[in-house]
Amino acid sequence: MTLILGRVNRDGVEDFRYTLRTALETTDFWKEKFSGVDTSDMTLEELAALTERVSIEPHDLYRTAEIWPDYIKKPRVFYTVMRTSGTTGRPKRIPYTRDDRIRTGRQLEPWIREYMDKGDRIASFFPPLPSSSGMFAFGGFESINAKTAYYQVPIQYLLDREMLLREFEDIKPTSIFCLTATAYNLGLTLPESIKNDIQTLVVGGETLTPELAKATLELFPNAVIIDNFGSTEDAVTGYRVITRKKSSEFTFTESIVVLKDNGDGYEQYKRIYITKVMREGELTGLPLFNYDIGDLARVEDGKVRNIIRVKDVITLAGAKLHIDQLMEIVYDHPELLDFVVIYHPLSPENPRPKAIIRVAYGDKKPAGIEDEVRELIYEANNPVRYEVEESKQAELEIEAVPLEKLRADLPKRLGKTKRIYIVGKDL
């Protein structure tokens, strides 16, 4: 089954065709992908049928000579370049133009106008600009002239309760912008006098389960949650609103989203393909058609009820542990043969997420292999060291076992890859 959601009205289809014409005129990557396809009056259904051929994946983003349009490469417009690692574990650089900022404002505007346009004070724990999440929040609010104040709080304050409280007492925030796990942890840290003033929790970057949403809202008695589904490549593709009484479906305002069966036997879970729609006359930094970011949508009655961000990434209190990195470490090591990950995600019963990386060796266990693998992980992804060793908000264990014991006593429920085994409730 295929679902097409988002900007699918008549104006959206016309803007999609403008986007397609612009991409074909300016971008080598899309000239090749659409070669031989009649694009003159392409419909959204035809685009959805082309996901196997006309699509783009995170690894393609390194091919800047092909995927960046000529108006970026020349350059004909001003743009900033945002750095992201995303699902690949390697830095990618994404151009972001003034039109991207305006487009992001349109993506955010529905929930800003309803929940945050009355003199709100935002305490933002996103990394310093020009991080993608920080640029989206700052640029989007600015572009629609929202009546809010945006306070960039040093992310290091999450490690220092005294500095954190001093900052919050000075700001007196009514809203917090942060990763999903951080919101829950702040609820355990902040005093009631501060939490009672929080009206909006804007979260994203990680899967938000119903159990975690309920527990977070219990810690912030006067707040609603805005759960954003975003990426550096497309900004905030969709959002939903969660209150104590209900959770809305995901809404996609500026993108075309194609949902297809994932082929893994889970009928409720659909693979997400994102098309970034420019409006007539705009030049955004990166045209995207059927972007296969790897995330899954949980669909009920034709509506997106949740988005699963866990594919080849494990979250340890905000730090990302990438399967790609583990593959490189294990398969580049002369004495290691294979690995699995046993993941205990953040939950009300488990306030410290935990990953057990089980590596397999052959005839003889290499001396000191656990410490060696741990150091290689830290070298590849330093934020994991920060969250695990310094802040102690997460746990990381390395187990070395003979190959025949690698898959012994694993949890029954697979994650969304064949390498991650999730302990606890299915997402």
Image: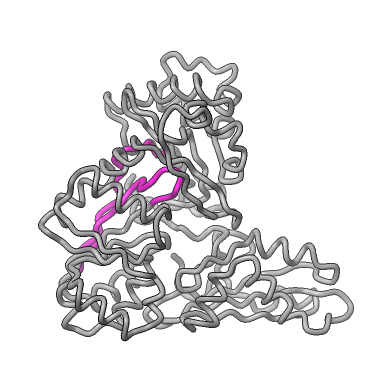
- Report the side of 161 relative to 398 (left or right): left
For image coordinates 25% across by 81% down, the residue present is: 166
Residue 252, magenta (yes or no): yes
Q: Quadrant of residue 382?
A: bottom right
Q: Nearer the viewer, residue 183 or 340?
A: 183
Eyeballing the image, is 153 above or below 348? above
> Can see residue 204?
yes
Q: Nearer the viewer, residue 191 or 170?
A: 170
User: Residue farthest to the right?
Assistant: 363
For image coordinates 33% across by 84% down, the residue present is: 161
- Which percent across, then down, holds residue 280? 31, 23
Q: Nearer the viewer, residue 244 or 124?
A: 124
- Which percent across, then down, holds residue 347? 40, 76
- Which percent across, then down, holds residue 270? 46, 48
- Which percent across, then down, holds residue 158? 38, 77
What is the quadrant of the N terminus in the image? top left
For image coordinates 44% across by 65% down, the residue present is: 427
- Report the side of 359 relative to 164 (left or right): right
Report the span colored magenta: 230-257
Eyeballing the image, is 126 above or below 67? below
Residue 365, magenta (yes or no): no
> Can see residue 245?
no
For image coordinates 52% across by 50% down, the residue present is: 294
Q: Quadrant of residue 333?
A: bottom right
Q: Quadrant of residue 21?
A: top left
